[in-house]
Image: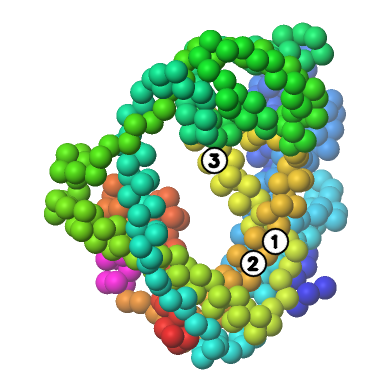
């Protein structure tokens, strides 16, 4: 057993009988016994008919909460995840509960300063600037009919199509006047490529196969699409002139030189941000490798579950239920759990590293700074401070966030 795993057994006597009484008063309201009105069955009659064991499940839930609070108050233990609990003894006079607590694992901080890590240098080339200008042109391009033209990469083909699997029409596999950008990879492999070279009015049958990672009932199946190209459209790029600069809406951009200057500044800022993130990641990775910590599997599992919940919420905002996601991708909760495990392990290890640095550096913040940060965060989210603290749980979380940020700043600054 790891040093931070604590098994604590507790016996409740008086509290247990109170829990039983409370459960009886709740259950008797719905109890039906011949000769008595609903809700007025005497306790001895109730127990004779249903047995005291019928009260145990609900009463045990209440007893667990009482015992949990009692242990925290008396032993000052600080669990990092929810404890597990087993009922090791139960009767009409007492209940014995065994809690298994996992507390903060012991961390031995290694070298975290002067690690010999170099931040990537930033360079912006003329090619990158010109590519960004082309991107802006494409973004502002007009889509026009391609007279007497054939479908090519980047064009938009307006198509009618109908799919067939096992000789039957594919449900949801047809469309009319559908605008398909060639090269967007919106359809299965081979579909868009099969339209290249066709003219408006042309028809073609595409014999394809659904990919391995498609929905379970279609993956690897043969599919036939009958396609008719109704119209071909292409992008007409705007000229780089005063009108183009005006349409961009960038302040102080009146000439090509101005545009190139702005693009260089934006790319520099973007690359600096990426370089900063990579530098922090490199510092964390190296410092974590110098640290000694034995992390419980349960702590990592808790992090994985948190990550899955976050992912499920992201999918929900996109209108997709997590169970539907499993169905579409042909995966399971266990698959996602396994997939997220390495990232969860890294997150947990980095968290303990940063906390250890904060402790080593004796980082702390006065209430005034914590209040200021809470106000800044509330303003950022467009809510009140009280609403923020209610969502966070307490002001201590805001303080913890400040300490972690400062610890990461010390880590990177000491390695520059």
Residue at 41% in and 27% down? 234
Picture layout, residue 364 above or below residue 143? below
Please check the rendered image and state whether residue 371 is part of the magenta-colored stretch, yes or no.
yes
Left or right: residue 28 versus residue 86 is left
Query: Residue 104, how many percent across, how many down?
Result: 64, 73
Please check the rendered image and state whether residue 168 is part of the magenta-colored stretch, yes or no.
no
- Residue that sits furthest to the front in the current view: 148
Left or right: residue 355 versus residue 37 is left
State which quarter of the image contains the C terminus: bottom left
Reading the image, the residue beneath label 1 is 342
Q: What element carries label 1?
A: helix
Q: Residue 249 carries which label?
A: none
Query: Residue 272, how many percent across, how many down?
Result: 39, 68
- In this orientation, which residue lies closer to the viewer: 252 or 315? 252
Q: In this orientation, does residue 289 appear?
A: yes
Alpha carbon distance from label 3 to label 1: 21 Å
Q: Give the mark toward the camera: 2 or 3.
A: 2
Q: Is mark 3 on a helix, strand or loop?
A: helix
Reading the image, the residue beneath label 2 is 346
Alpha carbon distance from label 2 to label 3: 22 Å
| Earlier sequence position, callout 3 versus callout 1 | 3
Reading the image, the residue beneath label 3 is 313
| Label 1 Cα crowd, 10 Å radius (few <14 / some 14-19 / many 20+) | few
| Label 3 Cα crowd, 10 Å radius (few <14 / some 14-19 / many 20+) | some
In magenta, the rendered stretch is: 367-373
């Amino acid at each position: 057993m790891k040093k931070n795993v604590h098994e604590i057994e507790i016996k409740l006597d008086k509290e247990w009988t109170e829990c039983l009484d409370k459960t009886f008063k709740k259950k008797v309201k719905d109890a039906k016994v011949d000769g008595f009105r609903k809700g007025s069955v005497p306790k001895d009659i109730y127990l004779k008919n249903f047995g005291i064991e019928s009260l145990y499940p609900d009463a045990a839930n209440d007893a667990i909460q009482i015992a949990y609070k009692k242990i925290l108050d008396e032993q000052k233990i600080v669990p990092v995840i929810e404890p597990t609990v087993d009922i090791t003894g139960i009767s009409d006079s007492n209940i014995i509960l065994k809690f298994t607590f996992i507390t903060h694992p012991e961390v031995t901080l290694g070298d975290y300063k002067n690690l010999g890590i170099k931040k990537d240098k930033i360079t912006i080339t003329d090619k990158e600037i010109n590519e960004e200008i082309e991107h802006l042109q494409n973004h502002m391009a007009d889509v026009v009919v391609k007279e007497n033209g054939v479908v090519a990469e980047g064009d938009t083909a307006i198509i009618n199509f109908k799919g067939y699997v096992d000789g039957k029409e594919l449900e949801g596999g047809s469309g009319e006047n559908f605008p398909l950008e060639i090269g967007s990879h919106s359809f299965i492999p081979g579909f868009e490529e099969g339209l290249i070279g066709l003219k408006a009015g042309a028809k073609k049958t595409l014999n394809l196969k659904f990919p391995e990672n498609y929905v379970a009932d279609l993956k690897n199946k043969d599919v036939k699409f009958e396609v008719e190209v109704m119209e071909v459209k292409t992008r007409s790029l705007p000229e780089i002139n005063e009108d183009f600069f005006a349409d961009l809406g960038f302040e102080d951009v009146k000439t090509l030189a101005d545009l190139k200057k702005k693009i260089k500044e934006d790319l520099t800022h973007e690359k600096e941000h990426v370089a900063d993130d990579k530098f922090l990641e490199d510092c964390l990775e190296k410092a974590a490798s110098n640290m000694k910590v034995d992390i419980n599997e349960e702590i990592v599992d808790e992090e994985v579950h948190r990550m899955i919940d976050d992912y499920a919420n992201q999918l929900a905002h996109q209108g997709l239920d997590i169970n539907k996601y499993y169905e579409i991708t042909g995966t399971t909760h266990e698959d996602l759990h396994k997939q997220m495990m390495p990232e969860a392990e890294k997150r947990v290890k980095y968290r303990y590293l940063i906390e250890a640095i904060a402790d080593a550096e004796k980082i702390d913040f006065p209430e005034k700074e914590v209040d200021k940060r809470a106000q800044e965060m509330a303003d950022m989210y467009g809510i009140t401070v009280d609403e923020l603290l209610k969502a966070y749980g307490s002001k201590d979380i805001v303080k913890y966030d400040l300490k972690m940020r400062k610890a990461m700043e010390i880590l990177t600054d000491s390695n520059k």
